[in-house]
Image (cartoon, coloured by chain):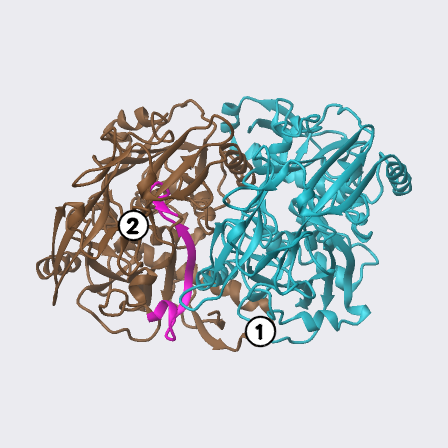
Chain colours: A brown, B cyan
Amino acid sequence: MVRACLYRPRGGSGPGRTTQFDATEIPLSQAFVSPRQTARVADIADRRRLAESAHATDGHYLSMDGFWEWLAHRREAVRMDVELIPLADLNRWGFETGTGNIVHETGRFFSVEGVRARLGGEGGATWDQPIINQPEIGYLGILVKEIDGVLHCLMQVKAEPGNAQGLQLSPTVQATRSNYTGVHRGSAVRYLEYFNGPQQGRVLVDVLLSEHGSWFYHKRNRNMVVEVTEDVPEHEDYCWLTIGQVRNLLQAEDLVNMDTRTVLACIPLDEASTAAAPIGASAFQTALLASLPSEAPAVHALPELLRWFTDVKARAELVSERIPLGSIEKWITTREEIRHESGNDFSIVAVSVSARSREVTQWTQPLLRTRAEGTIAFLARRFDGVVHVLVHAGVEPGFADAIELGPTVQFIPDSYGSPLTAGYQPYLKEILAAAPEQVRYGVTQSEEGGRFYQVLSRYMVVEIDHDVPAHEDFRWMTVGQLVALLQHSHYVKVQARSLIACLQSIW
Amino acid sequence: MVRACLYRPRGGSGPGRTTQFDATEIPLSQAFVSPRQTARVADIADRRRLAESAHATDGHYLSMDGFWEWLAHRREAVRMDVELIPLADLNRWGFETGTGNIVHETGRFFSVEGVRARLGGEGGATWDQPIINQPEIGYLGILVKEIDGVLHCLMQVKAEPGNAQGLQLSPTVQATRSNYTGVHRGSAVRYLEYFNGPQQGRVLVDVLLSEHGSWFYHKRNRNMVVEVTEDVPEHEDYCWLTIGQVRNLLQAEDLVNMDTRTVLACIPLDEASTAAAPIGASAFQTALLASLPSEAPAVHALPELLRWFTDVKARAELVSERIPLGSIEKWITTREEIRHESGNDFSIVAVSVSARSREVTQWTQPLLRTRAEGTIAFLARRFDGVVHVLVHAGVEPGFADAIELGPTVQFIPDSYGSPLTAGYQPYLKEILAAAPEQVRYGVTQSEEGGRFYQVLSRYMVVEIDHDVPAHEDFRWMTVGQLVALLQHSHYVKVQARSLIACLQSIW
């Protein structure tokens, strides 16, 4: 729901503070009277307040020490035991007659089906693979609220069966439609009403973005940030952190989950205030901050990049269609897994889960598993004092639009790989050969533990200062250009959004 | 292919002329040395030159009188006889065994299949309908070249079987992959090499845009403008016109075809020079020009509109899947057509075509036909001296992303309509009741004659200055905001793009 607000600069701001605004809700019709005074001003004011929160590296609700202490307590209180089981031991899940798809008895949640992909024109490569089908739009939402005048995010610690280390830091709400329409027979999704219900707050971010196109068929979530001003009920699994605190936690291994990372990447930045490098910033940090404004001097202007992207999409012409899981070729079903006949690539496995928080719950479900820790990396380079990252326009069969922009390298060792990944890693050597002082970011993070079994990757940003061979499907872009594009659907892959969030932890 | 050019302001420009630039092609790697001097400057220079051409209402190749004379000659030289025939008389086309789809014997071109659509959640409406499937990315390309220092577009007069009046003004190239890979056994597509071959010129526009989501399944074309500097072979079916000349021809009934209109809408405008109203401009024209800059004062800021659009998309949750034409429900196949059992809505018919230009060709093909002239209209209103149009975020089953932004009204009388169109025309009365002095544009135009049989609509822009009831799926937007969005895929419907081109004929 869109509401109109009238914004007035708040009097009495102290020195050194950015202007504060008072918002009064007004009828939508009145918002038409003088456009200049409404939406635009509100937008600028919101960006400023979000930037203030990003600069707040300690919180007014919990200090960082307090956070770690709280997390340790939650780790004691919440337990989840996960065990790999034979596929035949799945309970309430089974192979559907006729198709061989793995489906839930309610027909809800998700299913594991097949996809047949074919690359452009005659003679284009063709391959089959399993794919997770979940034709629902879910919510990844962070609730924010001012505490002592600074925006704080309501973050959740959450256990998922695929998590390698138990608890992770999740958005306030992480819900598929099956979750929140009660198929779980469990409790309602906490805080959901602030995102889609009568208590909805002011929407600061709301963009529909894809997830892993190699593993999900057309999956998308609303990435949302919603602000409330009223009191919100507390709950032991949730705490308020500034954006700066959450960003800093990206320096910890496997703690900030994928869903949080993608929402963080969508938060609009007040370019004027973030681009000024703080005292003591390194040359790289300064060049990184200079890369944030969408209008930063760039190797390629944005219109030129868009034309290039169209050309790559038109040339690739990937056609992919869902087919029954039972009819995919070159994949075999064993007792424990559905795997490629080569023994490489990912597999579909089953787990039994026993979770204890206040109450004990038990269930089984399929998960997607990879065989080794991956590498997800940007090559970075400064041009005219502005950091650029080398972006790959990569085809994945589950993308609604076939191609999105991703990291320079997205690599899983021992991956049979579709024709897309097999051998096509022109910059992998640069990443793996990087000297420690070139590694601007290098921390292991995981993909979504609700669908993926301990899928871990080393997320890296590696700076170079020499020429690398050009490839048609790669382009140097500023961070600001990538962020400008992820305001729209169908542009920036979840792995690249994760890396953007990771970069935020070092500027 | 992306190339790099170095741009230098050209010396000796006369008074009153905008700056001209000399471009020298340089290795791509050198373009990295000083980003500021390359892409951005080129982009600004291109916009200026395009704006100059848009202001040129008479041409250096043909005057308007000359154009009409030339067109009359072409009309005499080119003839196409089209006759409705029984479906069974289709030659080289037939109903595929098993599916009942209408397919070409080569399996190429397009096919007529079925689609089953379901609107969000439980209890959402469901309906079946035929749909044209053409999983190829085609080209809609206009070649431009400076003549006496002013950019001219190479326009084609072209006959299509569905054209109501024979010849229309088409882009230089209008080709599907089936066309240009020689399935036609005919001649190669003329001038295509400038868009995708070794002779490719400088790409000024290249964006992948949808076509009718109610009639095509996921159809998209590259909308391109490419500049050449060298001589181009002449051909009797082509002439060079300025952008201003083509725009003015939108005041003629059913002459500028749909493909030309959508490419026109994509041409970036030099906002600074177009926003200055010429002497003698009406108040509406002045307010229309003020609406062009993407940053014009607007009722809703663009980020707010994007959030609204996400919300509409997430709430609608249209799921559509292709099904065999033979299994669609509530449609019947008669001797002459496939039609809805109500006798309303569109139908699939067959035609026999005999074309005479230099050689005679003869073929049959299916076409989609509607039963009455439609109305495609924007309500327009000035807010703070800036024209806004009322945009509808409308669901269509053939859109890859379910919803795009379209006209206020998109209406076909006697249309049974899916649940989407049936009765849901909240602003139709405003359009039909408009007094003549409110009608800023009102000319009959047609949809693409290669697939649609005499599908004509009155394209209208109606200005109001009173409040109208608000509807959740409608928002007031500036022209500049719409144009900013159509730089990306999945935002602006072809009907809205046509209306944008029509608006260009009146400023």
Tell me where residue A84 appears, x and y as whole percent: 13, 46
Magenta span = A193-217
Q: Amino acid at mark 2?
A: Thr
* B479 up-or-down from A497: above or below: below
Q: Nearer the viewer, residue A45 or A193?
A: A193
- Numbered badge on residue B491: none
* Residue at 41 percent of width and 72 percent of height: A12
Q: Nearer the viewer, residue A472 or A187?
A: A187
Q: How many marks?
A: 2
Q: Quadrant of residue A503?
A: top left
Question: Secondary structure under badge 1?
Answer: loop
* B196 up-or-down from B130: above or below: above
Which residue is most to the bottom?
A27
Q: Is residue A471 left or right of residue A502?
A: right
Determine which residue is flagged by label 2. Answer: A97
Tell me where residue B58 appears, x and y as whole percent: 85, 42
Tell me where residue A40 appears, x and y as whole percent: 52, 62
Q: Nearer the viewer, residue B423 or B309?
A: B423
Tell me where residue A312 appears, x and y as whole percent: 50, 34
Give me the chain letter of mark 2.
Answer: A
Give the Cα distance between marks 1 and 2: 49 Å
Give yes or no for residue A197 being in the magenta stretch: yes
Give yes or no for residue B452 being in the magenta stretch: no
Q: Residues within 10 Å of mark 1 (few under 14, many from 20)?
A: few
State whether residue B385 appears in this view: no
* Residue at 81 percent of width and 69 percent of height: B437
* B360 up-or-down from B460: above or below: above
Determine which residue is flagged by label 1. Answer: B470
Question: Secondary structure under badge 2?
Answer: loop
